[in-house]
Amino acid sequence: VWGEHQSMAESAELQLWQATYKSADVRRTLIANVVSKYVEYLSLNDRIRVARETEVVLHGMLQAVTERVAVGDATVIDLEQQRSADFQVHATIPGLELKRKIAAHALAQLLGITPSALTLSDKGLDSLAFPGALPDVPTSLLVRRPDIRAVEARLLAADADIDVARARLFPPLTLSSQASVGLLTYAQLFFAPYGALYNAIGNLTTTIFDHGKRTQDVNFAR
């Protein structure tokens, strides 16, 4: 009578839509994570290549300084500084290779395969073709994102829960074979124990004198 079951059905349907949008949002997040890890892997390829090229250059400079020290054109301090720079670059390469391996393993985990089954190239970020910005895209497309639609469905379901809590403020009515007052005698209606009038008063008393529980349920739902 008060629309409680209708509001419950509406809330359940909206929660179903919320679950559907959440599933689409998980798929969207998975795609974004795969792209992010692949870009990180390509970036580490570039960093490793630059580090190795720098190591080759510094190693050649170290040999040149060594020859200059031999003919007295450079000092031992110059030699040690050049050797330190060479060692520093050389020490960064294993750390970068470890980060690349971790990124590859994370990418394989996102794809649901073993790292040995994942074949990746040594190309860098230059191998990517980034799409251009689309002109005149309306901002209304933002509401089509599944995460926003999931939040919207959750809000609508919560609004339906408010209607459920509000309907429970009214006295509960039970329809049975004795629902028609015309079939009850005067004595059954007013004086018989557990009669229709006493049942109505009992339900009404339960609703009013519940120490504000049902009213707080409405506030909690809101």
Image (spheres, helix red, strand yellow):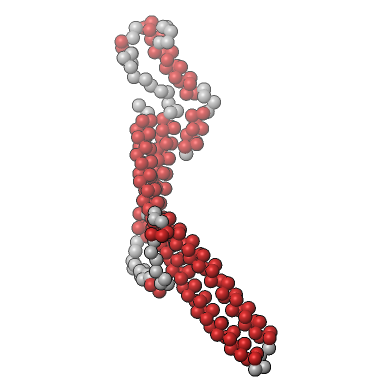
Q: Is residue 63 left or right of residue 104?
A: right
Q: Is residue 4 left or right of residue 81?
A: left
Total labels drawn: 0
Q: Is residue 152 left or right of residue 99?
A: left
- Give the camera-side residue of 197 and 222: 222
Give the residue drawn at x 45%, y 16%: 201
Q: What is the x, y in percent for residue 193?
A: 43, 8
Q: From what the image shows, is residue 27 above or below residue 192? A: below
- Give the camera-side residue of 35 and 108: 108
Q: Is residue 177 left or right of residue 86?
A: left
Residue 73 visible in the current orientation: no
Q: From what the image shows, is residue 208 above or below residue 94? A: above
Q: From what the image shows, is residue 29 above or below residue 90? A: above
Q: From what the image shows, is residue 175 above or below residue 158? A: above
Q: Quadrant of the N terminus?
A: top left
Q: Residue 124 sits in which quadrant? A: bottom left
Q: What is the x, y in percent for residue 129?
A: 36, 71
Q: Residue 172 sits in which quadrant? A: top left
Give the residue drawn at x 43%, y 13%: 198
- Give the camera-side residue of 158 and 114: 114
Give the residue drawn at x 39%, y 55%: 113
In the rendered image, the residue lying farthest to the front is: 70
Give the residue drawn at x 34%, y 7%: 185
- Give the camera-side residue of 104 and 159: 104
Residue 157 visible in the current orientation: yes
Q: What is the x, y in percent for residue 181?
A: 33, 13
Q: What is the x, y in percent for residue 99?
A: 51, 64
